[in-house]
Amino acid sequence: MCGIVGYIGDKDILSLLIDGLKRLEYRGYDSAGVALCGKDFYLMKTKGRISLLEEKIKNSYTNGNYSIGIGQTRWATHGPPSDINAHPHFDCKKEIIVVHNGIIENYDEIKKDLIKRGHIFQSETDTEVIPHLIEEFYNGDIFEATIKAVKLLKGSFALAIFSKRESDKLVAVRKESPLIIGLGKNETFLASDIPALLPHTKSVVILKDGEIALLKKDSVKVVNLQGEDVEIETMEINWSIEQAEKKGYKHFMLKEIMEQGDILKDTLRGRIKNGEVLLSEIKDVEFLKNVKNIHIVACGTAYHAGLIGKYILTDILDIPIKCDVASEFRYENPNINKDSLVILVSQSGETADTIASLRLAKNLGAKTLGVVNVNGSTIFRESDEVLQIYAGPEIAVASTKAYVAQILTLLLFSIFIGKIKGVVHKDFEEYIVREIERVPELVSKVLQENEKPKEISQKIVNLDNAFYIGRLLDYPTALEGALKLKEISYLHAEGYPAGELKHGPLALIEEKVPTFAISTDERVFEKMQSNIKEVKARKGKVFSIVREDFKGIIEESDESILIPKTHMYTSPIIAVVPLQLIAYYTADLRGLDVDKPRNLAKSVTVEWGERNGSWSDSFRWTR
Ligand code: AGP
C-alpha cells in the first residue's frame, strides 16, 4: 500500500506534490519521489522519508516551467527500499514517467519478454515494467498507449502517468487499488486517498475498477478498458483531513480492523492459482523437502500467529514443530542444527528479541525463514528466505491486520511444505485452497456484523477481569483476544487452554468475571461444551465466538457471536475479528488513546539492559 499523487495546473506543483505525499505517508514511508514536466523536466527520488526527499530537492531543484507533476511515497513490496527502486520509474528513453500503488503479479514474465526486445531495466521493482510496456505501444498518444499496455497487466494497480512529449495531460489508471480525481477550477488533482485532495477541493471522482482517465487542466475524460467512454460521477467530501487519513474511522486501529478483508486479498495475490499454492519467493525448495524439524519464534501477537502455524504444521507434517517466545528462545539452548528451519514471525521485522533469535539460529547452522510485513527491515534482510505478509503499514500499536495476514501466510507455507514433502495431496490442496479463497469475503462479512461486539463491550467496560478459553487451534485465538483487551483497554484478561480451567483458574470464575469461549475446531467442540458448563456452574457469564453449526455451545452460552463454517485451518483468521472489535469498543468506551496505549511501542527494537551479544554467544554449548 503506497500513496500516489498527481497534478495538472498552474499552482506551485512541487510544494503541492510534497504536501500531498506527506498527507499519504501513513500508506508507506520507506522511499519517495516526484517528477515534474512542462517546458522543463525535473525528477528526484530517494530511499527514506519525504523529509529526506525535501532535503535532496533543496540541493538540486531550480524553478522552471512545469505544468504537470506526479509523486509517490512507497511501501516496498517488490525490491527493497533504495534510491533506484523508489518511484517514479521510466522507460528506456526516460520519456514515459510512472508512479504506481499495488502489485503487478505477472511482472516477471513481462520483464523477461521486454528484455528480449532490448529494454534495459534499472530497478528490482514490479512497477518498472509499466513504462517499458507503454513504450512498446507509444506513438505520441500516451492515453492510447496506456490503454493497450494495461490490458496486459495482472494484479492491483493505481497509476499516474505522463509523457514528456505531452505535458498538457496526465493519465490515471485504476484496478483494485484506490485512485481519486480532485476537480478544481482550471486544475485537476489525483491521489490514492482523500487526505491529499482535501486542502484543494472537496469535489472528487472516485475511479472504479478497470477505468482509465485522461486528466487535463480543464477537463476529465474516463474510459473503460475497451476504450469506451464512461459517465463521470462527482461527489462532495465533508471529512476533516485527520478523519480522511483514518478513512472516516475514529482510530487507525478500527480502520485497520475494518480493512482486513481487502488486506488478505493482497496476502493471497499471486500465491494461489488453479487450486494450487504457489510460493515463488521460496528459493531453496530442496532444503524444505529434507528439513527435520521446525521452530517458530516470535513475540506478542506475532507469537500467537506462530502458535497457529505450529498447530497446522503439526497436523500436516510428521516432524517435530516447536513455537517459542523469542525472549526465551534466544537465551535457552535450542536443539537446532543444519537440518532445522527456524521461522521468525514479525510485523515490523525490527523486534530485538526476534532478531537475536534469528542470529542465534543462523549461528547454529539452521535455515531461517522471515514472515514479515516491512520490506527492507532487519529480519527481511537477514533471513535466508522471506515471505512478506502484504498487510501494508500498520499504524496502531495493537496489531490486528498483520496478525490475520501472518496466519494466512503461515497456512500457505504449511500447505506448500506439505506438498513438497509429499504429505499434502492434490485433492486436499484443491479443497483447502477453495477454503482459503473464501477467507477475505468471510472476514468482510463478519466485520459487517459488528453490533454484537459493541453490545458485549458495553457489558464488560466496567469489569476488571476476563478469561478467554479455547482448545487446539482456538487456544492461540483465546491468547490473542486476551492480549488485545489487555493492551488497549487495560482490563486484565487471561487466555487459557480450556481444559486447564479446572486446574486452577476456575477459582476466579464468578459473576463479574466473564469468559470468552472460542470454539471453531470440530475435533474438540464437545469438550468445549463441557468447559462452558464448568464456568456456568460457577455463575460465570459466557460469551462464545462459535462456529454457526455448533448448536450445543450456542445454547449453553449467555451470548454467542456466530462464525461461518470453514475449515479448522482458516477459522482462526475469522474468529479473532469479533475479539479485536470487542477490545476496540471497550477501550474506546473507556475513552482511552486506542492507537497509542500507555507503556507500549509499535516495535520493541531494544531489550531492557541490552548489551552487545547475547548471553549464549559467549557460553555456547557445542552440539
Ligand atoms: C501486539 O498488538 C503488540 N503490538 C506486540 O505484542 C507485537 O505483536 C510484538 O511486539 C511483536 O512485534 P513484531 O510483530 O513487530 O515483531
Image: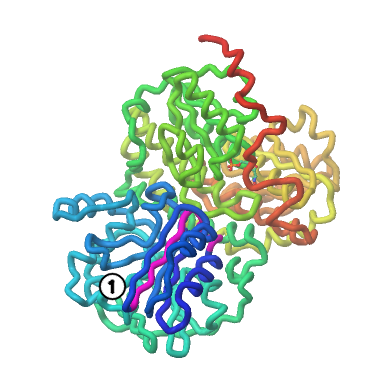
Helix, strand or loop at disc 1? strand
Q: Is residue 282 above or below residue 260?
A: above
Q: Position of residue 205 (x, y in %)?
A: 45, 80
Disc 1 designates what residue?
A: 163
> Which color scheme does this rendered protein use?
rainbow
Splitting the image into 4 quarters, where does residue 140 fall? bottom left
Read off the magenta span: 25-38
Determine the residue positioned at 47% across, 36% down.
370
Q: Is residue 51 above or below residue 109?
A: below
What is the tally of numbered marks visible in this picture?
1
Amino acid at pointer 1? Ser
Q: Position of residue 181 (x, y in %)?
A: 44, 78
Determine the residue positioned at 62% across, 44% down.
603
Of residues 443 and 371, the one nearer the viewer is 371
Splitting the image into 4 quarters, where does residue 307 fall? top right
Crowding at label 1, few (<14), some or many (≥20) Cα neighbours within 10 Å?
A: many
